[in-house]
């Protein structure tokens, strides 16, 4: 018996493969890179010169980008991989499951990081928003948000029966959240009932934390509740992601 | 594990294997053994339990009762994965990768893979090695399945209905790959509902119907017990008899014919094909 392929080697190879496939898939690459940029350009034009509004949408779009790069793309990907039988095929190889999932999630994390960089740079140079005031707090919130939405994306994939219905499921969760989480406007202006619902959702707290760190220079303590809510969603998501995981297509037996 | 995987133990041992899905009994206590280097065919109509059986052996499914050892180990043992190659019934690959990239990536998952170029040649993929997987025809995609199953240089390969839906040329090409696997000394377990496939590829066949093994043995031996004797009578009607003792039957028939002064036109004795055995067995159960 020869030694097995090392875990890190397997995860790294899978990650590199996912990156290569991401760039080869034009629609994924487009949404991954150009969508946040396009939204910033549009809102930048609409809110030109209104610094208060620009200060809202830059962290808002940063939060939305984290969610779309992880939650949305993993919900689609895992559903498609499962229904195409690719997960089942991988299950029959010696690659450790955890190394595979790490490579898959690493791809989503890389996209989230890429989009965050784009949003920060474009926010500063195109819209004239200040550089992030509290880098450390921003990175912590981004990291917790990425982890939270990564597991929630995998968890949602378990509820999606086939790739054709994935957009409906994903948008049913994603669109209302970006509308009420204060991505495009200051959430404080929304009616009380909307604010109450939004307070229960993770994106609201990610945007709040990012906004505090990027614009107001607040540390982690100032938004500890938001961090806690994200952590709880992440925990719930992790449990659901692991418990519901299926290697095989639903169409099968 | 070292001892369990030595070639002294059979490739597969199945004893009293049962599996039910709700109220449906997919396997009702089957036994068989597959020796190393053997091509073993599980033959049966759709729904006979073939896929349930191989998916248990591949470690994908739980079973309800019985003993199952694959290369001496529990089929769920992850250590087996490096020694077993699997061609599933229908299974996708990454659409945006080329054939070569896909095989290279799979090679990296195994501790001692075969050369990628050699695998591409063996699977007959040389001509489309640089095509994206999503542009492959059904037959080419199947060959990619073969390539991914054998790139890890497994001792044992499972093929679940490897040629279903193929045109005759693609089937012959797939058969050539399977024969090449046998020539490499691999143990092959293949399920099929094509009799000619089992007859021309398998060293031994088990006929599965409604979760039971109806017959087992080398394809030619399964048919050996009942010979078909056929002839035409003087008025041209076709007659046939089945017998386990063609010598005695021929003696009787020819003696009677000679006594009547007739000839037995087109007299023939055929050993039944696997198809006859199969139809006979499966009709008896139905």
Image (cartoon, coloured by chain):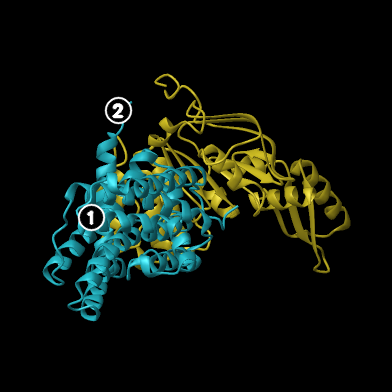
Residue occupied by mark 1: A113
Tell me, for residue A2, which label it has, or none: 2
**Colour in which the image shows chain A:** cyan
The residue closer to the viewer here, A42 or B69, is: A42
Q: Vertical placement of B111 versus B228: above or below?
A: above
Tell me, for residue B93, which label it has, or none: none
Badge 1 sits on which subunit? Answer: A
The residue closer to the viewer here, A77 or A145, is: A145
Q: Residue at x 59, y 39 (%)?
A: B218
Q: Left or right? Give the position of B163 relative to B184.
A: right
Q: Residue at x 21, y 57 (%)?
A: A216
Q: Is residue B92 visible?
A: no
**Colour in which the image shows chain B:** yellow
**What distance separates the C-alpha of mark 1 from that of mark 2?**
37 Å
**Disc 1, disc 2: CB below 8 Å?**
no
Q: Position of residue B277 (x, y in %)?
A: 70, 48
The residue closer to the viewer here, A145 or A32, is: A145
Other residues around mark 1 within 10 Å, as few (<14) / some (14–19) / many (≥20): many
Q: Position of residue B175 (x, y in %)?
A: 45, 53
């Amino acid at each position: 018996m020869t030694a097995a392929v090392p875990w890190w080697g397997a995860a790294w190879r899978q990650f590199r493969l996912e990156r290569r496939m991401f760039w080869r898939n034009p629609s994924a690459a487009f949404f991954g890179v150009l969508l946040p940029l396009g939204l910033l350009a549009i809102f930048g034009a609409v809110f030109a010169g209104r610094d208060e509004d620009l200060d809202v949408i830059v962290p808002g779009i940063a939060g939305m980008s984290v969610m779309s790069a992880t939650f949305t793309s993993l919900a689609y990907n895992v559903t498609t991989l499962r229904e195409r039988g690719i997960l089942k095929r991988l299950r029959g190889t010696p690659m450790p499951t955890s190394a595979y999932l790490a490579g898959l999630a690493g791809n989503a994390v890389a996209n989230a990081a890429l989009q965050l960089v784009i949003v920060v740079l474009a926010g500063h140079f195109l819209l004239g928003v200040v550089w992030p005031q509290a880098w450390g707090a921003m990175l912590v919130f981004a990291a917790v948000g990425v982890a939270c939405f990564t597991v929630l994306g995998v968890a949602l994939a378990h509820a999606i029966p086939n790739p054709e219905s994935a957009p409906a499921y994903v948008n049913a969760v994603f669109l209302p959240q970006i509308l009420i989480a204060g991505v495009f406007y200051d959430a404080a202006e929304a009616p009380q009932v909307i604010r109450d619902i939004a307070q229960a959702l993770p994106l609201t707290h990610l945007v709040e934390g990012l906004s505090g760190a990027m614009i107001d220079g607040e540390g982690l303590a100032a938004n500890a509740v938001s961090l806690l809510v994200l952590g709880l969603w992440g925990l719930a998501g992790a449990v659901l992601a692991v418990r519901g995981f299926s290697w095989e297509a639903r169409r099968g037996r | 594990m070292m001892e369990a995987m030595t070639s002294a133990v059979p490739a597969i041992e199945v004893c009293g294997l049962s599996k039910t899905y709700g109220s449906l009994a997919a396997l009702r206590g089957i036994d068989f053994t597959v020796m190393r280097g053997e091509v073993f065919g599980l033959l049966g109509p759709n729904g006979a339990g073939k896929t349930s059986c191989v998916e248990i052996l591949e470690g994908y499914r739980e079973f309800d009762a019985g003993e199952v050892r694959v290369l001496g180990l529990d089929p769920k043992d992850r250590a087996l994965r490096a020694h077993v190659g699997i061609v599933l019934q229908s299974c996708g690959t990454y659409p945006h990768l080329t054939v070569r990239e896909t095989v290279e990536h799979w090679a990296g998952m195994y501790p001692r893979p075969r050369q990628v170029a050699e695998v591409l040649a063996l699977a007959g993929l040389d001509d489309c090695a640089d095509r994206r997987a999503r542009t492959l025809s059904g037959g080419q995609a199947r060959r990619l399945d073969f390539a991914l199953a054998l790139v890890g240089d497994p001792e044992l390969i499972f093929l679940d209905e490897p040629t279903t839906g193929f045109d005759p040329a693609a089937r012959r090409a797939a058969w050539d790959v399977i024969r090449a696997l046998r020539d490499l000394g691999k143990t092959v377990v293949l399920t099929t509902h094509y009799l000619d496939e089992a007859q021309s590829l398998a060293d031994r066949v088990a006929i599965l119907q409604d979760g039971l093994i109806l017959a087992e043995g080398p394809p030619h031996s399964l048919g050996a017990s009942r010979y078909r004797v056929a002839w035409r009578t003087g008025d041209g009607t076709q007659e046939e008899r089945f017998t386990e003792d063609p010598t005695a039957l021929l003696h009787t028939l020819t003696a009677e014919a000679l006594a009547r002064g007739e000839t037995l036109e087109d007299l023939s004795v055929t050993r039944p094909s696997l198809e006859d055995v199969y139809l006979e067995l499966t009709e008896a159960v139905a």
